[in-house]
Image (cartoon, helix red, strand yellow):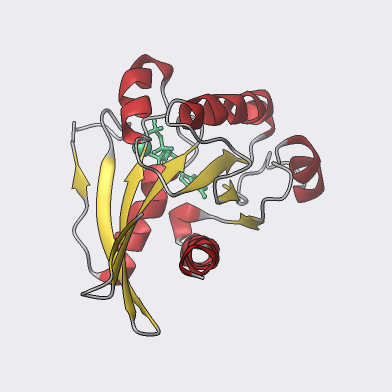
Amino acid sequence: MIIDSSKGVVRFKVVYHGIAMSGKTTNIEHLAKESGLDMLSFDTKQERTLVFDFITKKVKVDSFTLTFSIYTIPGQDIYKDIRKMVMRGVDAVVYVVDSSERRLAENKEFINTLDEDLRIYGKDIESTPIIIQYNKRDLPDALPIEILESEVSIPGKRSVEAVAVKGQGVSETFDMVIEELMEKFKKMVG
Ligand SMILES: Nc1nc2c(ncn2[C@@H]2O[C@H](COP(=O)(O)OP(=O)(O)OP(=O)(O)O)[C@@H](O)[C@H]2O)c(=O)[nH]1
Ligand SMILES: [Mg+2]
């Protein structure tokens, strides 16, 4: 978080984390489209994220301009060094879960990876604003939400359902991130 009080600007970094192919890039593609923003991608003629994707988004709240730098990690383990680099300076995380039954164990295990990634920078899952997004609710083998909530959740963190490929739940998720960050910001500035 960078606060420039003379200009009333606060900058936040938000990272979409979660297993490979869970829909992180799809989320920020939709955010970019909704806001008419261009997405920076290190594009590769294939859909997997090899480095990261990046957009910035501005939101006015009261007298402040909030600027969000939004990144996605590459979910594939072979890019773990890049993943760790992307997490530097993160203020909030969207943990994107693939609702498919086949990917339950991976979704669960990767929460430990998220915690490890945060710990590199002196943070952890408890102290970091995190929204859990249960994505791909349209899949025929999507697990019931109650099962996901008991199997893939983080104590004290809010969750939301999405079908990112149709844009459903995408802006709702990001609005929740803004709420969490504003709460933290207000506590910080008193
Ligand atoms: N059925 C369905 N497919 C989705 C949904 N969201 C994303 N997808 C598809 O899932 C695939 C992977 O999506 P990406 O957004 O590239 O996933 P990612 O998390 O960025 O993957 P990595 O970059 O490899 O970590 C694509 O084919 C998307 O179209 C969804 O809500 N439902
Ligand atoms: Mg991606």
Residue 44: percent from left, percent from top: 18, 31
Tell which of 154 and 99 is nearer to you: 154
Residue 55: percent from left, percent from top: 26, 54
Residue in view at x 51 percent, y 71 percent: 190
Residue in view at x 68 percent, y 24 percent: 105
Relative vertical location of residue 122 with respect to residue 176 in this rendering, above or below = above
Residue 75: percent from left, percent from top: 42, 28
Image position of 51 (left or right of 101): left
Relative vertical location of residue 81 with respect to residue 43 in this rendering, above or below = above
Relative vertical location of residue 171 with respect to residue 50 in this rendering, above or below = below
Image position of 151 (left or right of 183): right
Relative vertical location of residue 174 with respect to residue 24 in this rendering, above or below = below
Residue positioned most to the front: 190
Residue positioned most to the bottom: 62
Can you tell which quarter of the image residue 148 is in?
top right
Residue in view at x 51 percent, y 36 percent: 123
Can you tell which quarter of the image residue 100 is in?
top right
Tell which of 26 and 123 is nearer to you: 123
Residue 30: percent from left, percent from top: 36, 59
Look at the image and tell me in which quarter the N terminus lies: bottom left
Residue in view at x 25 percent, y 58 percent: 56
Instruction: Tell how many labels.
Output: 0
Residue positioned most to the top: 78
Image position of 173 (left or right of 36): right
Within the displayed image, which quadrant is ligand 2 positioned in?
top left
Tell which of 101 and 134 is nearer to you: 134
Tell which of 171 and 99 is nearer to you: 171
